[in-house]
Each structure stands twice: as C-alpha cells, then as structure tokens.
Image (spheres, rainbow, N blue to C red):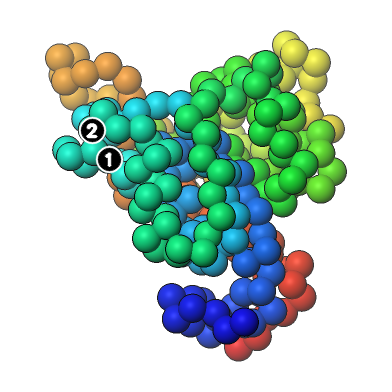
Amino acid sequence: MPYPAIFRRTELMLGTSTLDRLSQTRVAVFGLGGVGSWCAESLVRSGVGKLLLVDSDRICITNVNRQLMATVKTAGQVKVEVLAARFREINPLVELDVRQQIYSSETASSFDLENYDYVIDAIDSLSEKAALIRHALSIPSVTLFASMGAALKMDPFQIRASEFRKIEGDGLARALRTKFKKTGGYPARTFTCVWSPERRENLGAAGAGSGLGTVVHTTAMFGFALAGLVLADVEKRAGTTEA
C-alpha cells in the first residue's frame, strides 16, 4: 500500500524500509506537557503507527507558553483529548490509545507496556518517573528514552543525549539517582536521557507565579530530541541508510 503524501519527504530522507518499520512501531508517551506534547507530535508527523498517550491533566492557562496543545481557547480541556484530535487531523491512519490517567505503581499493569517498542518518559513527578523507568526497563523488548529537567534551560545548544549514569549537573537526574538508591538500587538496564547541564534561576518576581521558569524553544527541543532518538533507533533496526 503506497504511503500517503504526508510522508513523502520522510520516505525520501529515511527510505522505504525505515518508513515501513515506523508504520509498525508502537510508542508509549507518558507526560504530555512542554516536552512530551512536542515529542508525540513529532512521532505522529514521522509516521509512527501507534501511540499510547498518557497524562491526567487538563490544559491550564499557564501551559500556553510551552505546551503544543495549549491555547487560550483550549484552557480547561483534557490534554490527551485535544492532542488526539489534532493528531488524527495530521494522520488519520494513526492508532491512538488515549488515557487521562496517572501512571503509578498501582496503575502500572493497566498500560500493557510489553505491547510497545518504545517508552518515552516525560513525567515530572519523581516517584512516578522512577516507577515508570523501572517498569519499562524490566521488559526486555522495550527501549526507554527519558527526559531530565527541561525547566530553567535557555540555551538549546547545550541540550544533549547521554546514558543516565553519565549525566552531571542536572537536578532531576540527581534526585532520581537518590530515589533509585533508596528504593532498591539502579534499574537492571541502562537507558538514554535527553538533558542539559545549563544552570539558571527564576528571575521573575514572586508574584509572577509558583514553579520553575520555562521557555518553549528548549522544552520543545527536549521533546524533538526524544523523538529523534526513536527515529534513529528505528532506522538502525531497519538496517538501511538509503540516500
């Protein structure tokens, strides 16, 4: 079956065998905020055939500065539902499993991760993040890519991908290491993370709102980098680098 015209340029770049494999690839994305929403859109636009979209939140007005689906008009709507509607307009053939749900140790078994090729961790909560990483890495057939802290980052040229144990200067990675040590040690398998060593502080007045400062060009680049890791791995597995 010929590919829709929407993937013609992708096929020129990656070759038919890689595009074939992308159409059969299954990716679970956990956390659809400033990082995960852009990652998921990139995967849809690249021809990934099936996605599991997991996020429990509704769109908040403070999400507008960085999250793909957040606008003044969509504030208050369910994140995964807004994204799913958008993704079906991009690729009507994409298969979506949409969950307005929190991932936790208690809900882990309901996600059937063994049915997916890749898991994207873009969760902010430390306990949920640690639980997802352990769960995904306990399944030999699953490849995990994780985002470390994208807040308080301004310089996109410092963003990189490294094996988790080689990350230095990232607060979320440091907290995750501590969490692993206190809860049974590191996962059995290594995993690759997108992160930045950049260090900044909130500069806004206290009345500007709580939380950590963010800008969209860096959160989005974290998400695009995660999607890029998936595409590169699919291409490698397809065994082609067609010109």
User: Quick check: 228 left or right of 235?
Assistant: left
Residue 36 sits above or below residue 177 on the image: below
Helix, strand or loop at mark 2: loop
Between 37 and 26, the one nearer to me in the picture: 26
Q: Report x, y in % for residue 214.
A: 31, 35
Q: Is residue 163 visible?
A: no
- Hey, what amino acid is under mark 1? Ala
Helix, strand or loop at mark 1: loop
The disc label shown at residue 127, or none: none
Rate crowding at label 1 as few (under 14), some (14 to 19) or many (20 or more) other CA atoms within 10 Å: many
Dividing the picture into quadrants, the one containing residue 229 is bottom right
Q: Earlier in the sequence, mark 2 or mark 1?
A: 1
Between 236 and 22, the one nearer to me in the picture: 22
Q: Which residue is mark 2?
A: 75
Q: Residue at x 53, y 85 (%)?
A: 12
Q: Report x, y in % for residue 129.
A: 60, 26
Q: Report x, y in % for residue 99.
A: 52, 34
Dividing the picture into quadrants, the one containing residue 109 is top right
Are circles 2 and 1 on residues that touch, CB within 8 Å? yes
Q: Report x, y in % for residue 5.
A: 45, 81
Q: Residue at x 67, y 33 (%)?
A: 111
Give the CA separation, mark 2 to mark 1: 7 Å
- Hey, what amino acid is under mark 2? Ala
Q: Residue at x 77, y 41 (%)?
A: 114
User: Quick check: 121 left or right of 9?
Assistant: right
Residue found at the very far bottom of the displayed protein: 243
Q: Residue at x 42, y 57 (%)?
A: 88
How many numbered tags mark residues here? 2
Q: Which residue is mark 1?
A: 70
Residue 19 sits above or below residue 57 on the image: below
Q: Quadrant of the C terminus?
A: bottom right
Rate crowding at label 2 as few (under 14), some (14 to 19) or many (20 or more) other CA atoms within 10 Å: some
